[in-house]
Amino acid sequence: MATIARAAREAVSERRGNRPDWVLFATMVVLAIFGLVMIYSATRSSGTFSMERQMIFVAAGIVLYLVASMIDYREYRALIPYIYGVVVVLLIAVFFFPERNGAQRWIELGPFDLQPAEVAKIVVVLGLASILSPQNRDDVRPDLTWSKIGLVILTVALPAGLIYQQPDLGTMLVFVFVMMAMLFAAGASWRQLLTLVGAGTAITVVLFRIGAIADYQLNRIRVLVDPTVDPQGIGYNLAQSKLAIGSGQLLGRGLFKGTQTNFHYVPEQETDFIFTAVAEQLGFVGGVVVLFAYMILIWRILVIAANARDRFGALIAIGVAATFMFHIFINIGMTMGITPVTGLPLPFLSLGGSAFMSLAFALGIVNSIWLRRSPVPGEQYVV
Amino acid sequence: MRYSVRLAVIGFSFMAMFAILVLRLWFVQVAEGAAIAQEAQELAWQTRKYEAPRGDIYDRSGKLVVTSRYVPAVEVDRTFIPIAQRDELIQRLSAILGIPAAELDEMYEAAGINGRFTVGTVSVDTAFELARSLEDLPGVDIIKVPERVYLAGPDLAHVTGHLGLPTAQDLEKNPDLDPNVRIGKLGVEAVYDEYLRGEPGIFEYRVARGEIIEAKPEIPPKIGDSVYLSLDLQLQEVVSRALVDGIELSNEVKAANLARGEEVYSETKRAAAVVLHAQTGEVLALASVPTFDPQQFVSGLDQETFDRLRESQAFNNLAVSGLYPPASTFKAITYTAAEQFQFPFPQDVEGVDPENRIVHCDGTLELPSLADGSPQEKSDWYDGDKGWLDLHGALEQSCNIYFWSVALGVWQNRNSMNVNALQDFARDLGYGQPTGIDLTGEAAGVIPTPELFEQWKEYQLENPNSAPRLDPSRLELASPFLGGDLMDLAIGQGALTATPLQVAVSYAALVNGGDVLRPAVVRSVVDSSGEVTYEHQPEIVREVDIDPAVRRSLLTDLGRVVSAGTARAAFEDFGEGVEEVGGKTGTGQTSPNRDNHAWFVGVAPLSNPEYVVVVLIDEGGSGGQVAAPVARHILQYLFGNEPTPIVEGEDAD
């Protein structure tokens, strides 16, 4: 009976084509709606403007997700050099726009400010996936040569260097993390990985020595050990965030009732520190539910990476998973004082258009990979 | 490694990262949550205190003598200062206030993280200039702080006292004190500090990112209670001027003496006076010269000025802390004791008639040979022969020989009577212990007794390098207290020392019938709502038994001192009521190379004594010549007579 039923289901599935990953889509939408509620909670003292703005981004993000789902991800391969070029130009363009909060990250487009760094994250994932996967049908199991790794590093280094100049240390670190994850998935040997780690460490040490790393950036790391560093600045943010989360306790103070967050002790609580608002108001339980939603998201992306039709798709999915993972870990860790304070947003929760739309589009590409997997369960074209 | 294995490794790594986040969340919210929540509650509120204006001080007639006013001050609150703007802010403040940046820097660091500090009071002009720039100076504010104003100035300085920041000891004793708020350091400011201090205003608020986001209702500062002195400012001014004039007179006399070829050792610089109410113990005036302006402690006193003032003893209230031999003023005590206890007269002494209790005051007393080797002949202060005098004449003429004889009689009978009879009487009258006045720095003084001399001898033998109190020859004696010591005591000399206030209290007791009163400078304390929080009641420390006949006799004889005795010349111009004035002169000998201390104790009115006036001119010379005219001037004022200039009296003991 069971065998017949499975055969029937498979026949239907084959006839109707692959179904989209509804869990992926649903998780994204649930997180986005929850994000709207938290943004409202954090900004309601000044009206509903921020929430309404984010609603537009959410709507645009869902459209982008659907568009990306419909486009065959393999089509990007030929376009990658051109998209990459455009992104680099945009990353240079930000330096022609005025500084905000001591940084140049935005291209002003009237009602909406584009952050090219957010777009660059996705484009670099596509680029690396392209370099690390077979170039044609004969190239079934490509060796991961040092020259290929060199090309990967160059591809990452150009946008990463530009972003470092904005300055935005956090986003630069996203590139490093994603690159390492994708190299590992693509079959880099332990020797290659360790060499890269060693070289990276050496470069960091040199940068410290020549003073290329600004004091405030050092402070963001120092403050993890010694909270008295820069008490009015970064130390203040951290201390207040930790106090706010701690006062949430098991069940939270109740939605809209966070005194620490609602009295604006915690800065940037609708953007970078939104998890603080979640944890204070909804407690440990609320925080774990959010983390669980992200876990589902990451799990689904990795399942798609396992089921991708080709190595290109698989590597894209792994790159996207790594991007999400790094954002989640660094952002939430930051609010609890275990990772450095950086400007990385929390995916789908933080207020911000460029990040939301880029990540929604990335997730759409992942869904596209899922839709175009082998219709025969378990079968992969490229191993 | 197969692709699927690598994928699994990635999957597990990511799950591990989630696990770290969940564990950390558990730690912060559940394991440590309660403690952190508590901390959040406490850290959130900032408390700032507004110094309360100290209470006013009024004189006996209700005249304001010390008050408080508000002046602008600059305050810096680090909570509102972004770290990046710190240096620029200090530079700008330094430029506007004219305070070196390094100094401001030090204050800034000393205030600590999220701390607050007051840079100091500023002039109104500076405050206005600063007000224009406040917009660009986050964390800087102009606040009003109370400042003390001493309207009576130096005349009342030793009574009102002055303020200063609490020392480490003060803070240890009273942990509630704000280390930045001045407290009373001297006089009434110190003794009545708790009343005068008031309660600071409190403002509690929460700051987030440089803005106050929530505040509890502000509790305004509660002004301190008002203190009403028993002193009369006008009398105080008369007394202060009289002392200054007395010092001037003393120096004139010294110059004349010097011209005559007499020995003069130093310029007269110091004097003290007390006017005490004989029935209530209220202090009506209390002055010490030199003095200081307490206002200087408000505006800031440089080290040099401070050192100069301290060296001149300007901060010492000589009336309560200066110890002097009371000299012949003490004869009134010996007089009363001798009459009250009928001390035996010495036998077999030439010039002493024990039957009639009269003594031949011919200038020298030849003593019978004494086993202990006391000086065998004592010379009195005067030249010539005053004839045979009884107790009354002896007091009037301040005849030392008479009072020596009284002591000698006690000494001769020391085996059959209390050798300390005079000392005990003096102690009962308040000598040798603080009077308990409500002022700071009171001295106790010394009453010489055989027991005390034993102690001194022992101490001196154990600590040969300390300053000697006894002559080295005494150390060889089994009992270092000699008959001569008791004789010195009888005339207020020798080891006996007392403060002008103790002399005043003892005379008050002698003339009021035996009540030793605790003197007080404060009559009452009234809080801001008009409620009396403290009221001085005359406090009798001890009741000394004095025969009313002896008291009457003493009053009469004190009157004779003024009308016919050693103070007659000084009181010649007194005017109406002089018959109601009595007193006793005193000339205190100190070390051989110093001028004598000039004393006068006045008592009036004799029919029902109200005032005791004590004047001491430190190393000023003769009591009758220098101190008595000063007291006469003060008593003239008290009697409503026009005080006549302070001119030389008779050069008498």
Image (spheres, helix red, strand yellow):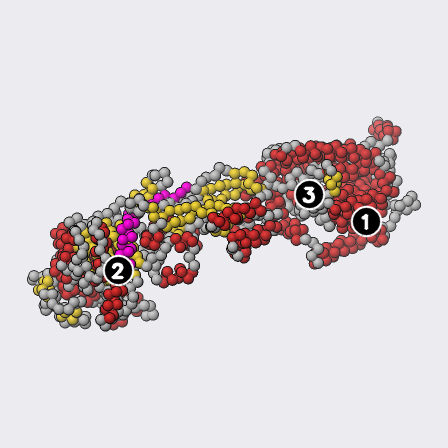
Give the crowd class for mark 1: few <14, some 14-19, many >=20 residues within 10 Å. some
Which subunit holds the residue at mark 1? A
Residue B62 visible in the snapshot: yes
Which residue is labeled 1 in the image? A155
Give amino acid for label 1: Thr
Q: Position of residue B78 (x, y in %)?
A: 55, 48
Give amino acid for label 3: Asn
- Secondary structure of the residue carrying tag 3 is helix
Instruction: Kindly report which numbered mark, 2 or 1, lies closer to the viewer in this rendering.
Output: 2
Which subunit holds the residue at mark 3? A
Give the crowd class for mark 2: few <14, some 14-19, many >=20 residues within 10 Å. many
Q: Position of residue A214 (x, y in %)?
A: 68, 53
* Magenta stretch bounds: B222-248
Looking at the image, the residue that sits furthest to the right is A138
**Mark 2 vs mark 1, CA separation in Å:** 101 Å
Which residue is labeled 2 in the image? B246
